[in-house]
Amino acid sequence: MSAHDEADSGSIGAINDNEESRSATPTKEPPRVVAAQAPIISSYNDKIRPLLDVIDRLRLLMVMKEGIQLPTIVVVGDQSSGKSSVLESLAGVNLPRSQGICTRVPLIIRLQNHANPRPEVCLEYNEKVVPVEESHLETAIIIATDEVAGHGKNISNTPITLVVKKDGVPDLTMVDLPGITRVPVHGQPENIYEQIRDIIMQYITPKESIILNVLSATVDFSTCESIRRSQQVDKNGERTLAVVTKADRAPEGLLDKVTADAVNIGLGYVCVRNRVGDESQEEARKEEARLFQTNTHLSSIDKSMVGVPVLAQKLVQIQANIIAKCLPDIVKNISAKLNANVIELEKMPKSLNSITEATQALMRIIGAAKESLKKLLWRGEFDEYPDDNTKHGTARLVEMLNKFSNDLHNCEESNLTKDFLSEEIKVLFDSKRIDLPNFLPHKAFLCVLQSKVERISHLPIEFAENAWDYIDEVVVSVFTSHSEMYYSLKVSTKRAAHKLVQKMRVQSINRVKEIIEMEKLTGYTSNPDYMTEWTKLMSQQDRFISQVNMCKSTSRAVLNGMGDIEIEHLRQHTNVLLLQQAFDLKMRMCAYWKLFKVRLVDSMALHLQYSVHNLVNNDMEEIVKELMGADGHGIEKMTTESPVMAAKREKLKRSIELLKESKDSVANTIDRIADYDY
């Protein structure tokens, strides 16, 4: 296999250019051929290093997991575009080459120029640091990739970090992502394209990311998937730099392609010639210089757009600019996240370390909640919840009472004219007995009363249920608010408070049912308005009976206090005495029902007030008894914190420590670079 063929077999990396040549533009001094030991970039890195160190430090602290975006050079390209070869040239080390997808995980490449003649190379993954000999780097990356992504051809979003400290390399940190492929090969999942797309979009979407788009000179740039992806998030190309590889395979017309810029590459193009076959990096740089100096078509390209050294210089400059630009926002975002976490930690329930602490906290909670409930449900004071009218208890209970009263006064049983006298006539028929002819049996009155009370009995019960549901919400909410600082107590007191309210709810509803049963048991009132109302209504009896029996031309009659009444159905009853008794019974019931409705509303109001008074003044001690338990050891359970809350507390503490360290690191660096002019 020739060197050129071997290059073709490298899907991600070393596919570039064999027997390439470079020449300088005739009007300019040709570039110096790089010597074997010459650095790829100048000592300009001395100014960049502090910037890059702080970003690398933040990346090492994994501050991005806290939602803090960092300036990142993200290397993207279609499969076999020569992407990894570009990184090889910049890093001065050999990366893996193979058919298909070679880069299966995000590879963070952290380059640091240092004067030590012996390079230092290591891999960081799965929370470990593995020193690597440069000659064994390819194998070490493959082993690390298999450990992170599994054997085979699957990909993973878990990154591996390659640290290269070497004389002559530029101070850069880049992320190499899997090459874009549309058709899965044997051993790859069917959705390999979607997986790679999602990883790429995750890295290039943040506005802090610089996109290094690797394009092959042999293809139409506009057809490259990597271009489509970068244009999705950087439409005008303001943060996209293009690297064109394989210039020797398509030198003709390359100048027009990189100067026309049909795909909006805002940061410009750099054409490079990467290592081919077994070439060393030094040999590759010499061949690159020769290619762009001597090739007829390539020598016309401006020297500010060719060569790995130019690419390194551009990347260092761009990286410095974006880091310096983003640092103030990074500090701001770190501070905001730090403050938010501190506040959240302070709001978290405090842990209780002893029975004494738990008991004292419980009594404070009970006392504070009791006072709040007195204000809300008894005294009508809302200073604790001025803007939350759902907590304005006395006002809400009055609304419920008014609704109950309206429902009762407007229900069907309060319609005095419907089927006028029909029920009374039927009851009188059913209650006949040997008795005086003008005697109105009490049983008839009681039968009508019981029937009517039964039919409205659901209204006071529903009122009581709704009132206690609301009281339960307020009580539980107040106890939750006052016990928020203590998770174990919050859970226990909420449960105990709810249990107390439910107990009182049952008692209250039973009491309402008793009131209903008392009203059904017998009719009684000492209110003189009853006789007054009945007398007034009865004064219309003779006229009404006359209208029923004599005025056949009309089917309706008018009664004061009731209105217009249908009477046609009464003409079938020729027994005048029966009609008189039915009218009397109806008027007694009308007079009594009017008083009954008022009395029932009053009874509900007084009963509710009495129950609420007992709840907020007397029955709160039931919560303490419930929490203590029958054996008195219940309070011990409150000293045990929920595993979920404990984990959250520790997570927040770690986050706060990380963010504090991050904030200090950035602040120190900003002080150091304050006088730099980029």
Image: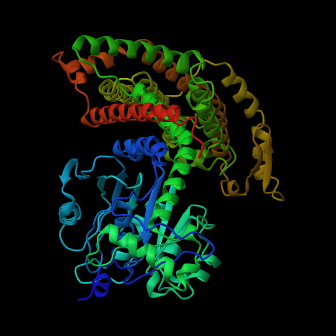
Which corner quadrant of the image does residue 551 belong to?
bottom right
Which corner quadrant of the image does residue 14 belong to?
bottom left
Q: Is residue 439 above or below residue 627?
A: below
Point out residue 632 in the picture as x, y percentages from the top left corner: 18, 15
Q: Which residue is found at the position 81% from the left and 58% from the top?
A: 552
Q: Is residue 255 above or below residue 239?
A: below
Point out residue 91 in the picture as x, y percentages from the top left corner: 35, 60
Q: In this view of the protein, which residue sits in the foreground, 614 or 4?
A: 4
Q: Is residue 166 left or right of residue 272?
A: left
Q: In this view of the protein, which residue sits in the foreground, 617 or 84?
A: 84
Q: Is residue 137 above or below residue 487?
A: below
Q: Can I make out residue 134 in this image?
A: yes
Q: Can I make out residue 452 in this image?
A: no
Tell me the quadrant of the picture where the N terminus can be found: bottom left
Q: In this view of the protein, which residue sits in the foreground, 262 or 461?
A: 262
Q: Which residue is found at the position 41% from the left and 54% from the top?
A: 170
Q: Is residue 622 left or right of residue 148?
A: right
Point out residue 354 in the picture as x, y percentages from the top left corner: 22, 15
Point out residue 556 in the picture as x, y percentages from the top left corner: 79, 53
Q: Which residue is found at the position 61% from the left and 30% from the top?
A: 389
